[in-house]
Every structure is written in structure tokens, then in C-alpha cells.
Amino acid sequence: MTLEQLIATNFTVVTLAFYFSFILIEAFSIRFLKARGELNAKDNLTCIFMGLMSSVANGAAAFISVGAMYWAMQYQIISLPITITTVVICFIANDLRFYVHHRLAHRVRWPWAMHVVHHSSQHYNYSVALRQAWTKHFSGMLLLYVPLVIIGFNPAVILFVALVNSSYQFLLHTETIGKLPRWFEFIFNTPSHHRVHHANNPQYLDANYGGTLIIWDRLFGTFAEEDLEDRPVYGLVKNLDTFNPIKIAFHEYWGIVQDQLQKGLTLKDRALYLLAPPGWSHDGSRLTSEDIKREYYASRSETSSPSLAPAGD
């Protein structure tokens, strides 16, 4: 099989077998081998259902993003050949694209309305990796693939390395695997790093956006280490507490609609309810993740400050 044939292969059956094999292995390890981790049948089934419906919905709408990529080929600066070298370079470039995509999806409310689905589970296992949005191609975020096309990469190569990247990321969603060797943890994203990303602990918010490589977070100041004395607590800052897939898929979009229907908003307010960080409000009645972190560190600073009371009182 040539490299071109490998890239053109339909991996749907292979990836499904890969995902469900690891879900079963992890479940067996937790249930019978007493491996670290937690299972919740309702949550596991909800995650799997969300993933299956995501495949259907996003598969049906894929022509939007994939079409944009092939349309952009006419504007390529150069057409790079498909070689092992260009595939590796494309993988690294796409991983940087994913970092930008992922960071924006947490810091801008419109794409967060899509991505919040993945973070809405209060558990952390391989089934959570399948808990994906149904509206990815309507968020606009997948258009970030277009610059990779323009600088010369074939869309088929981009889609191939994106599949490899997402398959690697699937393996990060587990508590069963502890910390890995220090050199590996320094360069690559790991289960430990990604547990931090899924946590709602104030000190862990807005951290570890990397896909395969964690070096982007180290370079751009968004890295946070998992503290074994302060274990991650999974879920949202305000959890949904529901297994209803419709609510999980669309609750944040409904929140946007409700905010837009408020009376007395300026045009700027309406724009910010779409484009500001999640938690922003025109009257300051809500908290963004930055506000939550600021309050957390301020309270810690006050708690750790030495007493000013006179000795002996």
C-alpha cells in the first residue's frame, strides 16, 4: 500500500473498533482489576449515544467544511507533494491549528456552545471522548483548516492527520493511566494533562488546550500541571445534571437565545453575548472563568496572609 492509498483509506470501521475496544478494556480493568477510574452506566450510554449521533449529524454536514477546503485549493501558494516528510509537517501544523481551535472554543461563547457538550460529563473515561457536539460544521471553527490548504497541504492529508490526532486524543480520556515519563509529559499531551483540561477546579480552568503536543500550552502560557494532592473534579462550572441528549446538545444555544431576547441591550451587548468568553454578562451578574480564577487566588491569598492581631490577644 502506498502512502497515497493509506491516506485515501476509509478508516470508519477501524476507528469504531479502536474506540469501543478501549472502552471495554478500560471498563474491565476498573470493574475486575480494580484499576483507578469510575464508571456510570447512564453517563457512559449517554456519551456513546452523543458520539453516534455526532457522527451522523456531522457526517451529513461535512460537505460544508470539506467543501471549503477543496474550494481553497485554487488559492494554494504551492502544492506540496504527499511524502512522509510533508505528512509529518502537516501533522505538526494541524496540531497547532487544533490548539488555536480549542482555545477559541473555550474563550468565545459561540463555539463554546458547540464544545460544551464534550465537557458536560461529570465523569472521565474513554466513553467521554465520544461525547461530541452535533453542530461542529456550523460553529465556523473547522474553517481553520483552510489556511493549511492555502499554504500547500492536500485536504486529504489534512483530514488524515486530523484523524490520527483525534485518535490519539481519545486515549487521553482515562483515569486508569497515571503520570508517564517526564520527557514524554514535557512534549506530549497525556491523560494527566487532559484530566486537568476537563476539570472545573478554579486553578485548572482554561488550561492544556493541546491535541497531541503539550508544547503549545507551555509556549503560550496555558499549561497547568495535575496536582496529585488536588485531584481534578470533572464537569462544568455549573453542571447540567441531566442525561437528556437534547438538553446536552443544545442547552448553551438556548442560553444564547434567552440572552439575546433580553430587553434594553445595546448592539455591542448582543455581539458580546455571542463573542465574549462564556459567563460574560452585560450587567456583571455572572462570572467568566477568569473571574472565578481571580476570586479563587484572592481568597487563597487572604487565607495564607499572616494574622495582624497583636501577640497574646
Image (cartoon, helix red, strand yellow):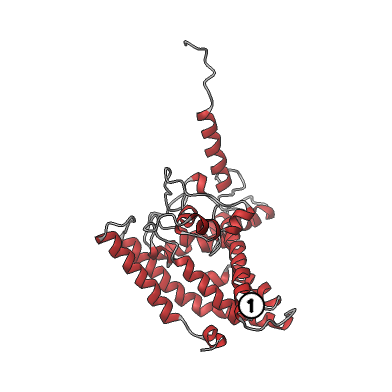
- Residue 273 in percent (x, y) is at 61, 55
Q: Residues within 10 Å of mark 1 (few under 14, many from 20)?
A: some
Q: Is residue 63 above or below residue 296?
A: below
- Residue 107 in percent (x, y) is at 59, 55
Quadrant in the picture for residue 260: bottom right
Q: Is residue 276 above or below residue 7?
A: above
Quadrant in the picture for residue 293: top right
- Residue 148 in percent (x, y) is at 66, 74
Q: Nearer the viewer, residue 182 or 173?
A: 182
The residue carrying mark 1 is: 86
Q: Residue at x 57, y 81 (%)?
A: 63
Q: Nearer the viewer, residue 261 or 301?
A: 301
Q: Nearer the viewer, residue 252 or 167?
A: 167
Q: Residue at x 46, y 51 (%)?
A: 199
Q: Residue furthest left?
A: 32
Badge 1 amino acid: Thr
Q: Secondary structure at mark 1?
A: helix
